[in-house]
């Protein structure tokens, strides 16, 4: 028991340790983005998608829309419901950073924040079992692990990077919840609350990473049940998962329900299916083959590093007062590594076909995100061996620096992406849309790149002369479009807007059902002669209301669990 006199010193020491961890994580993150200072931004595969989302969200905030759902400038201004389906944390963070730093600096600052978070989460896991210096090395290893470098330099998947940063903390809280390691707070309710909070944060960051995380913690809970010969870890895990899903329901429920309203199947189009992306799979696309070879080589490197470090760490599990917990952690991390390795090769096709939603991960090598956690911990544990400390340090340094150098040379560097998107928005042209978020019935490849906001069409679909009419745009925001039309003849007016069930259209305050163009989902409104006022508003659908209600219930449950845990801790104090 710690005396009241020793408590301030212990707290001060703990605070200093976390300052050291912050410093190491910050230093590592700055080294990761060092090439940005002279080469510009790494323009990876997903850079344009994320930068466009940041710009659109920031613009909507300026309009007073604090929870964007419709991406206004996608599909060259026709829009798409991207923000309903893409988890909010990454695009909200990117948009928020734009109010603090210049737009071209947002990607680098985002990466620094994510990798600092990654280092701190890895430190939290390693410090629970290892000395401070070893845990600090583990933090640096995770903040600059080979998969993180692949994501930063060649993929620019900022959302996945943010989700991966949290994975060590997910593992730690899951271990405490299922009882494989001692919960030092001695509060099951608080352990469940912390796990649920971190698990929900992963789901609110990136969906593929969240699917991987869900299967990983489910495997962890099942292993704990086998090892403890008890169903208790499964029940605890189920409770934590249920609370985590409840917290994220304001996003999950609409995203799941409204999939029927978009072309979500396009996410698994040719080249994006698991069968096309197992390690070293070659196809008919040379560019795809080159990248898959690079990703596969990074995966093999990470697995080899993990294996070597695991062997070194194994020899340390019999030392120290926490040897039993270290053995349990070693077995769990090795299990997760083995499962991830199996799922990256073609022989695991059965699992990708039949396990629910696993195919939406798309790329089997994404399981490197899980392997990176054991790799960082085992690397930290290996540093405790006096004889091989410097040898292992040199090997890790060579592997990381070599990977970074190779990827920096292979990626495309360009600082004009964001200015080009800004110009497109300023010129009322917008940017390209996303196949999987295209509203059902639309073919966004048929949309004009420079269409007027409202256009008069002939009264009959068969064609003919378009009648004379005056159109005045009264209001045009992301979630509300108002146009006044004056005509002496019946007309049809095409709005630069894709039809979607959440859009509620009125003419002179009377609800109407809009028509569609022949080859796309552009919204067309038929009008009678006279002065007509067209109003289109993006309204809250019942699924969004239900999701928000479930999340509110989840937050109340979370607060109750944290409060109950705090009360128990106080009652247990001397």
Image: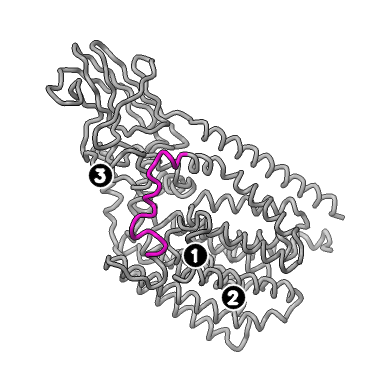
Task: State whether residue 424 is above or below residue 124.
Answer: above
User: In x, y percent, where is residue 478?
Assistant: 37, 33
State which quarter of the image contains the C terminus: bottom right
Which residue lies under the disc numbered 1?
350
Q: Is residue 354 within the magenta segment?
A: no
Earlier in the chain: of badge 2 and badge 1, it is 1
Distance of label 3 from label 2 (alpha carbons): 49 Å
Q: Is residue 144 left or right of residue 488?
A: right
Verify CB contact (< 8 Å) between mark 1 and mark 3.
no
Q: What residue sits 31% from the left and 71% below the top?
A: 409
The mark closer to the camera, 1 or 3, is 1
Q: What residue sits 39% from the left and 19% below the top?
A: 511
Q: Which mark is residue 378?
A: 2
Which residue lies under the disc numbered 3?
445
Q: Secondary structure at mark 1?
A: helix
User: In x, y percent, where is residue 491?
Assistant: 21, 19
Q: Main secondary structure of the magenta part?
A: helix
Verify CB contact (< 8 Å) between mark 3 and mark 2.
no
Q: How is the image coloured?
A: one colour
Say if residue 157 shows up in the picture: yes
Highlighted magenta segment, given as a residue range? 258-276
State which quarter of the image contains the N terminus: bottom right
Q: Secondary structure at mark 3?
A: helix
């Amino acid at each position: 028991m710690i005396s009241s006199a020793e408590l301030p010193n212990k707290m001060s020491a703990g605070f200093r340790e976390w300052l050291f961890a912050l410093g190491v994580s910050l230093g590592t993150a700055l080294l990761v983005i060092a090439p940005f200072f002279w080469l510009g931004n790494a323009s990876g595969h997903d850079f344009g998608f994320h930068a466009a989302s940041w710009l659109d969200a920031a613009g909507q905030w300026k309009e007073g829309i604090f929870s964007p759902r419709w991406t206004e400038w996608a599909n060259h201004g026709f829009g798409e419901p991207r923000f309903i389906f893409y988890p909010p944390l990454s695009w909200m963070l990117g948009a928020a950073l734009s109010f603090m730093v210049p737009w071209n600096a947002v990607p680098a600052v985002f990466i620094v924040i994510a990798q600092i978070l990654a280092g701190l989460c890895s430190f939290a896991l390693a410090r629970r079992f290892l000395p401070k210096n070893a845990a600090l090395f583990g933090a640096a290893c995770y903040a600059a692990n080979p998969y993180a470098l692949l994501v930063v330099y060649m993929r620019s998947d900022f959302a996945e990077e943010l989700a991966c940063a949290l994975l060590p903390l997910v593992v730690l809280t899951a271990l405490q919840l299922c009882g494989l390691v001692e919960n030092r707070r001695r509060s099951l309710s608080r352990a469940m609350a912390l796990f649920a909070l971190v698990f929900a944060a992963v789901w609110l960051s990136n969906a593929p990473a969240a699917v991987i995380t869900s299967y990983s913690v489910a495997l962890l809970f099942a292993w704990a049940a086998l090892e403890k010969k008890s169903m208790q870890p499964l029940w605890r895990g189920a409770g934590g998962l249920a609370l985590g899903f409840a917290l994220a329901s304001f996003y999950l429920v609409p995203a799941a329900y409204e999939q029927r309203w978009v072309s979500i199947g396009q996410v698994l189009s040719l080249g994006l299916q698991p069968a096309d992306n197992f390690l070293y799979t070659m196809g008919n696309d040379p560019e795809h083959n080159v990248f898959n070879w690079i990703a596969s080589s990074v995966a093999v490197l990470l697995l080899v590093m993990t294996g070597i470090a695991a062997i070194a760490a194994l020899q340390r599990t019999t030392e120290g007062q926490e040897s039993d917990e270290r053995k349990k952690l070693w077995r769990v991390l090795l299990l997760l590594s083995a499962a991830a390795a199996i799922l990256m090769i073609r022989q695991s096709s059965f699992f990708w076909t039949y396990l629910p939603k696993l195919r939406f991960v798309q790329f089997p090598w994404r399981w490197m995100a899980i392997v990176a956690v054991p790799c960082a911990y085992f690397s930290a544990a290996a540093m405790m061996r006096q004889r091989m400390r410097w040898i292992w340090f040199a090997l890790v340094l060579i592997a990381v620096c070599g990977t970074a150098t190779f990827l920096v040379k292979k990626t495309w560097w360009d600082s004009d992406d964001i200015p080009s998107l800004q110009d497109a928005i300023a010129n009322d042209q917008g940017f390209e849309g996303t196949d999987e978020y295209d509203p059902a019935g639309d073919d966004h490849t048929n949309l004009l790149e420079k269409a007027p906001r409202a256009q008069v069409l002939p009264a009959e679909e068969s064609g003919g002369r378009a009648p004379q009419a005056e159109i005045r745009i009264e209001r045009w925001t992301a979630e509300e479009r108002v146009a006044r039309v004056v005509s002496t003849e019946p007309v049809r007016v095409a709005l630069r807007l894709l039809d979607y069930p959440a859009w509620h259209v009125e003419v002179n305050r009377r609800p109407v059902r809009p028509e569609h163009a022949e080859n796309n989902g552009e919204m067309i409104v038929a009008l009678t002669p006279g002065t007509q006022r067209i109003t289109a508003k993006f309204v809250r659908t019942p699924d969004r209301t239900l999701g928000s209600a479930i999340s509110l219930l989840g937050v109340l449950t979370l607060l109750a669990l944290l409060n109950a845990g705090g009360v128990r801790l106080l009652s247990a104090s001397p």
